[in-house]
Amino acid sequence: MRAIEYRRHGGYEELRLVDRPPEPATGGRASIQLSYAEVSPADNTIRAGRMDSSLHQTPPHIPGGGAVGRITDPGATGLAEGARVVVAGGGLGWRTDGTWREQLTADARQLIPIPDGVSDEAACALFAGAGYSTAYLVLTRLARLKTSGTVLAPAIGGSVGMGTVDVARQLGASLTVSTASRTDKAEAARAAGHEHVIDLSRESLTDGVARITDGRGVDVVVDGVAGPLLGPCIASLAHGGVYVGVGYSGGTEGTVNITDLIWKNATAYGYTFSMTPPDIARSARVTLLEWLRAGRITSTIARVFPLEQAAEAQRHLIEDRPFGRVLLTMAR
């Protein structure tokens, strides 16, 4: 089977197309022929060597935290041959080889049936970058968003920003706010139905939030950007607000005015999936797929690359910062 791997940490050029033997289904693991795989910022961070080595497999390594495909051999899983499934969890792309390949085996707990009416492409895009899953788990379990609460999630084009805005609406948020680094992305977001998008090329985050909320601030911030936006995100909290850091696409360091935490009685958390039991994370994905089937949320795709162009797909996601998800297709 064709696969993408890297043998040492470094730039995009380390990603190489290789031939790997297929994995036979054994015991409780089914064999899946993959159709699409997600491309996420975490893949880039791990490959570049910017993540603690204790958190991921050492090279050689196949990236990819999720994919969709069709079961070709169910093994002893009890699942049906030919069933379309989402493949996720179990340390894929982190502690084990990931999904940037044509075939893999997975435990039944990693497989979620794709509802009729949902395409493989849409299902894969929904979970690319883990933005929707992260948003659902953070808003329901950590921040405990209240009905009619208000939410800020920077970077509307990214998986966390877009996912949080969409999920927060479904959970009853009265107001959702995001940002765009460029005017064209802000306009694309508004055309897609995201009303409150702050164009950071024309207005600061804090000024924008103050304008939109009449100076009150927001109840919850889900931040996948950090860096220079860390301080402004916390400054944009309402009294008693909750800040949750889930990523750092904008950088790992930022400046915070401590009074924005103290005098607002604010709470700050960091979140990773390791905080969530696997069965609860799986249940969240099932719920999100049902929302997608029902048309309550959508999955926006920026571009689909063939597997052999994985290096360019990764560069496009990280450097061009497209509006929507980036996928790999296994079709030849």
Image (spheres, rainbow, N blue to C red):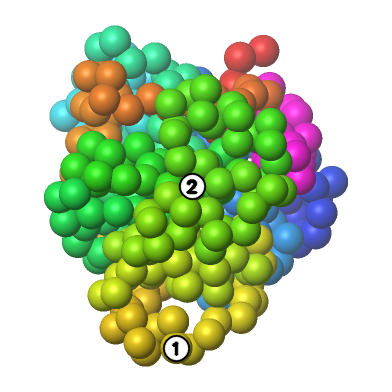
Q: Amino acid at mark 2?
A: Ser
Kindly identify the residue that appears in the image at 23 percent across and 54 percent down: 149
Asked whether residue 162 appears in the rendered view, the answer is yes
- Residue under pointer 2: 178
Q: Callout 2: few (<14), some (14-19), or many (20+) C-alpha neighbours within 10 Å?
A: many
Q: Residue 259's mark?
A: 1
Is 303 situated left or right of 263 in this image?
right
Toward the viewer: 209 or 106? 209
Q: Residue 126's mark?
A: none
User: Which label's residue is closer to the chain start, 2 or 1?
Assistant: 2
Task: Looking at this view, name the residue that lies furthest to the right.
Answer: 13
Q: Amino acid at mark 1?
A: Thr
State the image quarter where residue 311 is shown: top right
Magenta-span inclusion, residue 264: no
Asked whether residue 159 appears in the rendered view, the answer is no
Is 70 situated left or right of 129 in this image?
left
Magenta highlight range: 306-323
Could you say whether the residue bearing mark 2 is in a helix, strand or loop? strand
Is 298 situated left or right of 3 in this image?
left
Is the residue 322 above or below the residue 207 in the image? above
Magenta-span inclusion, residue 308: yes
Tell me the quarter of the image containing the C terminus.
Answer: top right
x then y, percent, for residue 127? 42, 38
Kindly identify the residue that appears in the image at 38 percent across and 56 percent down: 214
